[in-house]
Amino acid sequence: MTASLGHVTPQAMQFADPLPLRSGASLRDYTLAYETYGTLNADKSNAVLVCHALNASHHVAGTYEGQAKSEGWWDNLVGPGKPLDTNRFFVIGVNNPGSCFGSTGPMHTNPDTGRPYGADFPVITVEDWVDAQARLLDRLGITQLAAVLGGSLGGMQALSWAMRHPQRVRHCIAVATAPNLSAQNIAFNEVARRAIITDPEFHGGHFYAHGVVPKRGLRVARMIGHITYLSDDSMEAKFGRSLKGEQPAYSTQDIEFEIESYLRYQGDKFSEYFDANTYLLITRALDYFDPAREHGGNLAAAFAPARCKFQLVSFTTDWRFSPARSREIVKALLHNRFDVSYAEIDAPHGHDAFLLDDPRYHALMRARFDGIAKEVGA
Amino acid sequence: MTASLGHVTPQAMQFADPLPLRSGASLRDYTLAYETYGTLNADKSNAVLVCHALNASHHVAGTYEGQAKSEGWWDNLVGPGKPLDTNRFFVIGVNNPGSCFGSTGPMHTNPDTGRPYGADFPVITVEDWVDAQARLLDRLGITQLAAVLGGSLGGMQALSWAMRHPQRVRHCIAVATAPNLSAQNIAFNEVARRAIITDPEFHGGHFYAHGVVPKRGLRVARMIGHITYLSDDSMEAKFGRSLKGEQPAYSTQDIEFEIESYLRYQGDKFSEYFDANTYLLITRALDYFDPAREHGGNLAAAFAPARCKFQLVSFTTDWRFSPARSREIVKALLHNRFDVSYAEIDAPHGHDAFLLDDPRYHALMRARFDGIAKEVGA
């Protein structure tokens, strides 16, 4: 029997100690928004941390009371009787600093100036997020995670946990991720950033003071993102060349094809709630992630400190982070003779597949967490 | 011995007869800019029409006197002793109406209003361009082309020639093209258009009157385009994750990676000379091209009227118009029992490969044109 978690409640934790960042700057007086589901067992061995990607948050599963359509972003995976079973595990979702869903971000007050950070929010990296998450676990009294789990940018955080806090992770599960961004990945991020930064309503990142939002830039950024999240095939299957009307209207500015309507809708929706500075920060965190870099490009050397077991998952039609990128990680892990499982799931949905409930993918995740539950007595 | 054509001179032809367009509108009092290279032989059998893609023009080969770096866009292919040998063929390049390099376009005066067309320039299709080109050939006294040649959007025009004017084409050579745009192709076009249209300096397409240019939108549009022209591999080989500086500067707004610098440069350069309304018109012409549509999706039926021989060429790393798209065309042509040759060139450069002088590709083109020259006595 699977069921939804029902209503969940976000929590917040304040941190007075400055968080040293990879850039050399630090973040002080910050708050982390988080949620937990299930019960931490007596020996605190059943905690699973779920790391989020660009457009997600600490709200991993369940719903908010009185809010329609408020399911968490991974509600199909996390809940009672679900693959990551909250009857057995204590699941933690944390909103990363720099994001715009509750943790300290660019829209909050910069203690140095008394005004919103805006573009002055310090540049933050995957490693910084992992360290912030580790501090939250300290405060929750959790020494070791049964598992750390993430997809896409969340997968990078899971991998970073294994490298930075090897004693604190038993299992690392990294889905639809990559050891770093390719030139093409960075290129897409850069175009999205340029769309935002050159929007006249961006005001150098200090638009809050002007009472405006660079929605034009955010829309374009989101549209570009969406193209890279879907596979060519699934876009073709879902929209193809279908026209909005019966016949072509012969217009350069109006919507003519269904795919245009879909993309505009996604862009509009996104621009209503996402923060422009957060978009810049998070795409930069993606760009910068490159654990091999300080080991002269040797990814195996970067993973050498790890002590956990690894599960990697990729999807055949994901062209953002293709299976070949996961295989690079697997190769580096095997070089270290780690315990590694790797699944390449034949799924049509492109990068977005990691958020969907493909039966083979979810069966794999269920089996993996069943094994972990036995191992930690959950 | 190959040599450059040396200095060439653009010409212009006026047309008073309105050109009926597919949209139902018509274009009146228009001019076509064109260039010719080589000599039309006595029986006018050696003419080759070269059709251009988005960002090109009638200036196919040679240079302009007193202008540095003014080589035509296909100068490596067209000239004395080159694969398309101007010692044997009479080569014609025509700037398509709606473009911004000399033929009547949105920046020119609308005879109905006395002001620049701007966004009121009629929506124009591949078929309309082909018909405009046919009228130019009428005026040049050319009844039948030895060949029509084009790459990408130019390839669509070459294919359209074979369907619309079957008696006027002996050979159709279509390179790196597609029978229509996929949903993903349309999606990229739409994002580029949104970037332009939502630029406040676009003024609904009537920016000429405001003395401004929507450069922000044009830059973003060109950056998106560039990503789709290059292969993932060639971008990786050329730029990879190379930083502009020695160490990361940790900035969200400044250039950090070489690929960003390259894309911004391409965007800046493009925004200095390309017309925003032309960008909309040409991407729409791409979107609308779909000869199978009025035959219930049956591409073979669309090609049935053709009478010429066909050469199709694709490039293995082209993900904009992949080899699979060329194979769709080949299949439809073979269904009609036409004389079809198809070459899939193993080249690393993605869609842009059609403009480069890959030795196997150029050897193939040379052999093809040698054969055509013999056939027409050129």
Image (cartoon, coloured by chain):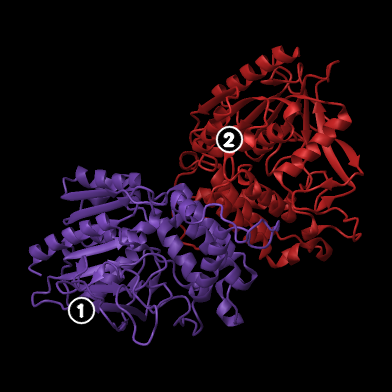
Chain colours: A purple, B red
* Of B355 and B278, the residue lying toward us: B278
Please report, as a chain letter, where disc 2 is located. Answer: B
Badge number at residue B52 = none
Total label count?
Answer: 2
The correct choice, above or below, for B46 with respect to B166 in the image is above
Secondary structure category for the residue under label 2: helix
What type is the residue that disc 2 sits on? Ala
Q: Residue at x 71, y 34 (%)?
A: B161
Where disc 1 sits, the SS reads loop
Q: Going 53% across and 36% down the picture, which residue do you hit?
A: B328
Chain to which the residue tagged by mark 1 belongs: A
Name the quadrant of the N terminus of chain B.
top right
Would residue B218 appear left or right of A310 to someone viewing this image? right
Mark 1 packing: few (<14 Cα in 10 Å), some, or many (20+)? Answer: few
Q: What residue type is labelled 1?
A: Leu
Q: Locate residue A249: give its quadrant.
A: bottom right
From the top left corner, tell me how far across and down residue A278 is, in percent. Answer: 46, 70
Residue A135 in view: yes
Whole-percent x, y for residue B302 in the image: 63, 38
Determine which quarter of the picture holds residue B46. Answer: top right
- What residue does disc 1 label? A140
Q: Quick one: quadrant of the C terminus of chain B?
A: top right
Q: In this view, does A64 lie to the left or right of A136?
A: right
Answer with left or right where residue B145 lies relative to residue A160. Answer: right
Residue A181: x %, y % from top left: 41, 51
Mark 2 to mark 1 CA distance (whole Å): 67 Å
Q: Which residue is drawn at 43% across and 65% down?
A: A282
- Residue B300 is tagged as 2
Q: Is residue A276 above or below residue A321?
A: below
Query: Can you name the residue that lies furthest to the bottom here?
Result: A66
